[in-house]
Image: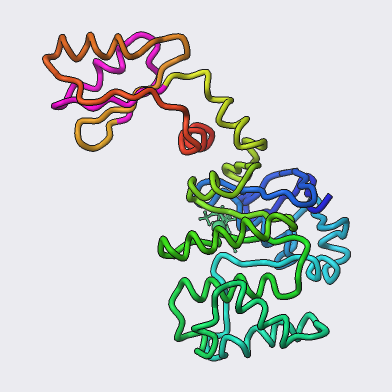
Amino acid sequence: MSVRIESLTKTYGVQNAIDHISFSIGHGEVVGLLGPNGAGKSTTMKILTCFMPQSSGEAEVCNFNTRTSPLEVRRRVGYLPEHNPLYGDMYVKEYLLHVAGMYKLANPEARVKQMVELTGLGPEQHKRIEQLSKGYRQRVGLAQALVHDPEVLILDEPTSGLDPNQLVDIRNLIREIGQQKTVILSTHIMQEVEALCPRIIIINKGKIVADGSRESLQRGKKGQELVEVELDGAIDVALLRGLNGVLRVEVLSGNRYKVEAQAGNDLRKAIFDLAVKQNRAILSLNVQQSSLEDVFRQLTRS
Ligand SMILES: Nc1ncnc2c1ncn2[C@@H]1O[C@H](COP(=O)(O)OP(=O)(O)OP(=O)(O)O)[C@@H](O)[C@H]1O
Ligand SMILES: [Mg+2]
């Protein structure tokens, strides 16, 4: 196993930031760690990368225990922290050489050059880190996480704050890296999960509420019917809620409504009849497959 955690718990005062969580990740897997703000994602990552000790339970990377063999773990892990702390007054190359030096790499110059190319830092490499835009700082963070060619990469919200072009570049880079390495990444962007993560672990309030393939999680909710309808004017939401089998109605902008019902209820005819009765025209009506966002919200709504 590349990563294994067993009953891992971190307590701050009276709060369990993570509460007896366990999972194993095999070599070469790319796993999305999802969860609402404050769920415990960064806490889990900090323990796995030896930045913080756990209160109880065990964490292992490449069969090395984070408590008893932290140096062995650090050698094998690349970590992009949430608040990517970089030395602002260092130059990009100087900083990366400094990190390469800490890992005592055989040929640091060549490796840094390679990382600069890989992360697209070429045009910015002669600037000081504090002069870089957020997206380029993020690239420096990725380059430092990769410089020692770690077996496991732990990326805490790697694409936060990137523009759409950089986002695609960095996602492509992560996908490429994920072909050879184990990657755990946290994100709030569901398209990113769709694009990168065949497996998903969802944490809510310090506990794991889902762990499985992306497909199986989406299929798991298929027992429900989801329809999005757009009308030519507003309608009383209570009327939609009152339709047979309806579990939830979400009001979207522009007289659009998302209606969720138990499987087996064909909402289309019921909504059509209701619209006619209410003198409303249906501008569009789509039966939707449950999205990852729906799965996430269903599992993490308090
Ligand atoms: N140093 C600390 N002292 C006290 N509580 C903390 C500390 N660090 C984290 N916490 C708490 O632990 C919980 C989990 O925090 P964590 O940063 O792991 O969440 P997260 O899932 O990464 O959230 P986000 O999506 O906002 O980044 C939160 O309730 C947070 O307030
Ligand atoms: Mg976090």
Vertical arrangement, residue 282 with respect to residue 116, above or below: above
In front of the other: 302 or 92: 92
Q: Is residue 171 shown left or right of residue 3?
A: left
Q: Is residue 10 shown left or right of residue 275?
A: right
Q: Is residue 39 shown left or right of residue 225?
A: right
In front of the other: 141 or 126: 126
Tell me residue 218's x, y (percent): 55, 30
In front of the other: 33 or 218: 218
Tell me residue 144's x, y (percent): 65, 75
Vertical arrangement, residue 291 with respect to residue 274, above or below: below
At x 52%, y 50%, the residue is: 192
Q: Specify the quadrant of the image occupied by residue 62.
A: bottom right
Q: State yes or no: residue 275 in magenta.
A: no
Q: Is residue 73 shown left or right of residue 156?
A: right
User: What residue occupies the far left of the structure in this picture?
Assistant: 279
Vertical arrangement, residue 131 with respect to residue 159, above or below: below
Tell me residue 266's x, y (percent): 38, 10
Q: Quadrant of ligand 1?
A: bottom right
Q: Specify the quadrant of the image occupied by residue 48.
A: bottom right
**What's the magenta region?**
226-250
At x 29%, y 9%, the residue is: 270
Res. 302 in view: no
Tag count in the figure? Answer: 0
- Colouring chosen for the image of the structure: rainbow
At x 53%, y 71%, the residue is: 138
In front of the other: 189 or 235: 189
Res. 22 in view: yes
At x 27%, y 17%, the residue is: 240
Tell me residue 74's x, y (percent): 78, 69
